Image (spheres, rainbow, N blue to C red):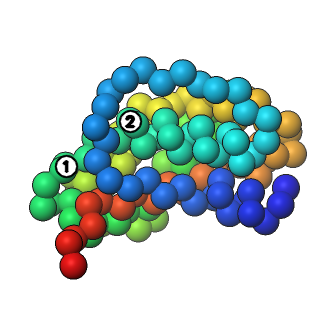
């Protein structure tokens, strides 16, 4: 796996407020990069942000490990935003996007490298 693909899968950046609860269809992916894009889009759509001043400039990082079936094994907070409600919203976004069926589409070697994902959630940016 290229360093670029490893970087893309190891740290997803999920920004802003989710504006829709529409049902997303999982698209087939053939490599780590396309699977990462599909996962990122689904988690972004599942995020339930507090779209007001409370989320301004908040950042939280959640490290998650998955089975080959895309089921969550463990999630842990690696960097808190300092706001438990915002941190909980990040956990809920990942939980509601699971199982990450894209992981089932990866070969065993790519899965081993992709089975642990750090999701970085960034709230609304302050107007500067």
Dot 1 alpha-carbon crowd within 10 angstroms: few under 14, some 14 to 19, many 20 or more: some
Q: Which structural element holds mark 1?
A: loop
Front residue of 109/36: it is 36
Residue 50 is marked as 1
Left or right: residue 72 versus residue 87 is: right
Q: Answer few, some or many: residues within 10 Å of disc 2's Cα (few below 14, many 20 plus, some between 14 and 19).
A: many
Q: Residue at x 21, y 71 (%)?
A: 126
Above or below, 18 relative to 98: below
Residue found 85% across the figure and 55% down from its top: 1
User: Marks 1 and 2, Cα distance to the nearest angstrom?
Assistant: 13 Å
Residue 46 disc label: 2
Residue 47 in view (yes/no): yes
Coordinates of residue 86 in the picture (x, y in percent): 25, 54
71, above or below 43, in the image: above
Image coordinates of residue 53 in percent, x first then y, are 12, 61
Residue 25 x, y percent position in the rendering:
54, 21
Foreground of the two, 79 or 19 = 19
Asked which secondary structure carries label 2, the reply is helix
- The C terminus lies in which quarter of the figure? bottom left
Q: Is residue 16 above or below residue 126?
A: above
């Amino acid at each position: 796996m290229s360093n670029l693909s490893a970087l893309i899968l190891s740290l997803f950046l999920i920004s802003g407020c989710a504006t829709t609860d529409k049902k997303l269809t999982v698209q087939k992916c053939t490599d780590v990069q396309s699977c990462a894009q599909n996962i990122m889009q689904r988690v972004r759509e599942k995020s339930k942000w507090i779209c007001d001043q409370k989320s301004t400039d908040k950042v939280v990082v959640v490290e998650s490990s998955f089975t080959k079936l895309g089921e969550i094994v463990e999630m842990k907070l690696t960097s808190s935003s300092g706001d438990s409600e915002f941190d909980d919203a990040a956990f809920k976004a990942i939980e509601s996007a699971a199982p990450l069926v894209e992981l089932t589409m990866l070969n065993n070697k790519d899965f081993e490298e992709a089975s642990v994902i750090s999701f970085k959630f960034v709230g609304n940016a302050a107007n500067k």
